Amino acid sequence: MKNKSYILIGCLVTLMFVALSSCKKYLDKAPGTNVSSTAAFTNFTNFQGFTEELYSAVPEYESHIWACDWMLGDEIVHKTGITWLNEQFDNGDSWSWTNSEWISWLDGDGGTYHTNPTTGFGKGLWPNAWYGIHKANLGLANLSMLNGTQEEKDLIKGQLLFFRGWFHFELMTYWGGLPYIDTLLPSNAKLQLPRLTYQDMADHAAKDFREAADLLPVDWDNTTVGKATLGKNQQRITKVTALAYLGKNYLYAGSPLMNRVSKGIATYDVDYCKKAADAFAELLQLVDSHATWIKLIDFAHYSNLFYTNGGSFIPGYPETIFQAPVYSSWFAGCPWGPSSIFAEGNIGGGYVSPNARFVENYGMANGLPIDDPQSGYDPNNPWIGRDPRFYHDIVIDGDQIIKGSAPASKEKYRYANLSNNGWSRDNTGIGRTGYLLRKFTPMTANNIDNFPNNYMHLSYMRLADVYLMYAEAVLQGYGSSTSTGPNYMTPVQAVNKIRDRCGAGEVDPSYYAKDDFMEVIIRERAMELGFEEEIRYNDLRRWLLSSKMKYREKTAIDFDRGGTYPNGAPKPINISESILVTRKFDDKNYWLPLKIKDVNLYATFPQNPGY
């Protein structure tokens, strides 16, 4: 992504600036080693180097931990006897996000494998966000020093405004309304900024995202500056990125949880939803006109969104809208990585299994949910005729999980046996739900195929997410699944864009009613975006669904084998569902608690209710 000179200069300037601004006494030094504290801001190359540290402050959550533990929602069940953040949340312990638990990507950690300061490892959201906000404000305060073209000034300002908005947005997503710091605070300033309501904070973030969108290009390759890194600009912040987060920021502000905490009304705010729809429509029209390289990837290459499987590319292209920078392939070929399955020994996949209750979100190939009487779903043959994404994401009994040759003694492991007494099922470990996770896992990521090179890298946001958020925003803002909203496509058309991509049936007209179509969106977001980042966790929270028993119970599908299908696949019999975990969830758990040391800083920075 980055021009090497930008990176080197940025690191040097940052280190020098910190040293000059924080040290009161200096060791003896050679003549000529004094560096001006304004050097970072005088020309574009230096200023871009200063700005690019903001990219590296974005947590690379999937590499921060190796056990799929960025997933804090209802998608997974961990093996027993292991302390992971998802498991702690199941126990009702929201305090575990802090660095007292090394497994949390939300905070810093002291884990042996995750403390390299030159990469995204070991960088947690809470500390990095406040640092990033300060750095963005520092850059904006010194923008007048930049001696450059208008394009250069716009690019720097647009990036700084985006990151200031983005870090605030991420903070309020997990912790609710906080102070919005849009000015450079003096080091001796008295801390007294009050916590804003969520929606007040969102209004500030929207202002930053909107201005960033107006300043940034659709494609850096088409700028004079971008020619220096032509073809290597795909991870840079663009107008599309800023519009995407402008829309997401408005949609979140209009969601039931955020509206409840701001106005005491646990329903959607129509005005915020309309603003979200406007922003998403502006973005999608850029996609339609091919002004941006961003587009939906074809389903034949769907896995390229998530991992390389030996390829030399950054996962996500051309659909990703925002992701953390790529630093290394630390997990490439790593047997303990989140994208690994041990074919033998019943270990792998980061110690997790897909929650069988969550898997029920995957509908049928005809587009109908499994509980629709017309869907054709047969509970005695539960894996027949499902949505194509089901077979991409989930390993079911009888699936091939070894690709190459295997010793005769291990040949039986070629196909998963997830029945009650199968070799792929460990009721205290991997496969304990009757399923394995394949979404991020090429078949060869196992101990018999010997874990060949594979790099997994997920996006914070990709285009499919935008289509589905647009559908939700128009539905809730304009009240109909068939409304064109801001003179653009209908929610039905937006959802069908995603279904058409994977070859699933389009939304049946019997689900066009507003409440029914919202259920379609909930299921569709689960199928398309499940297991990725914190999308599902935050969706359930903002919809005020996390407290519902349906989303708290984590289950297994229990079955024996009884013969085979005509194609030779094993046939399940004696099928039943058992509850493995019921997440403890009180109303306070809709927000994470603030660190005690932080809420003690000053009186107008109170703790979240219930903690």
Image (spheres, rainbow, N blue to C red):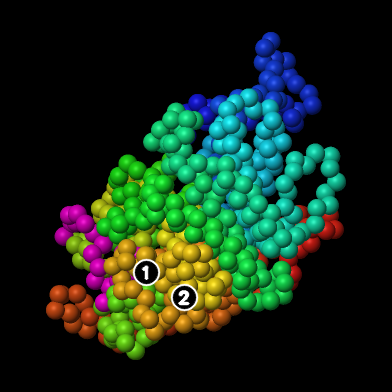
Quarter assignment of residue 503: bottom left
210 lies left or right of 27: left
Q: Write the residue at 39% across / 60% down.
A: 349
Most common SS among magenta residues: loop
Q: Which residue is mark 2?
A: 481
Q: Nearer the viewer, residue 179 or 141?
A: 141
Residue 118 at what x, y percent from top left? 53, 36
Q: Residues within 10 Å of mark 2 (few under 14, many from 20)?
A: many
- Whole-number angstrom distance, CA of label 2 to CA of label 1: 12 Å
Q: Find numbered disc 2 in the image and state the secondary structure of the residue it sits on.
A: loop
- The stretch drawn in magenta includes residue 391: yes
407 lies left or right of 467: left
Of labels 2 and 1, earlier in sequence is 2
Q: Write the residue at 29% across / 77% down.
A: 366
Q: Nearer the viewer, residue 398 or 304?
A: 304
Residue 169 at what x, y percent from top left? 62, 55
Q: Number of callouts in the render?
A: 2
- Mark in front: 2 vs 1: 2
| Residue found at the very far bottom of the displayed protein | 373
| The N terminus, quarter of image | top left
Residue 147 at what x, y percent from top left? 63, 24
- The stretch drawn in magenta includes residue 396: yes
Can see residue 36? yes
Amino acid type, mark 2: Ser
Amino acid type, mark 1: Asn
142 lies left or right of 403: right
| Residue found at the very far top of the displayed protein | 31
Region in magenta: 385-408
Q: Which residue is mark 1?
A: 496
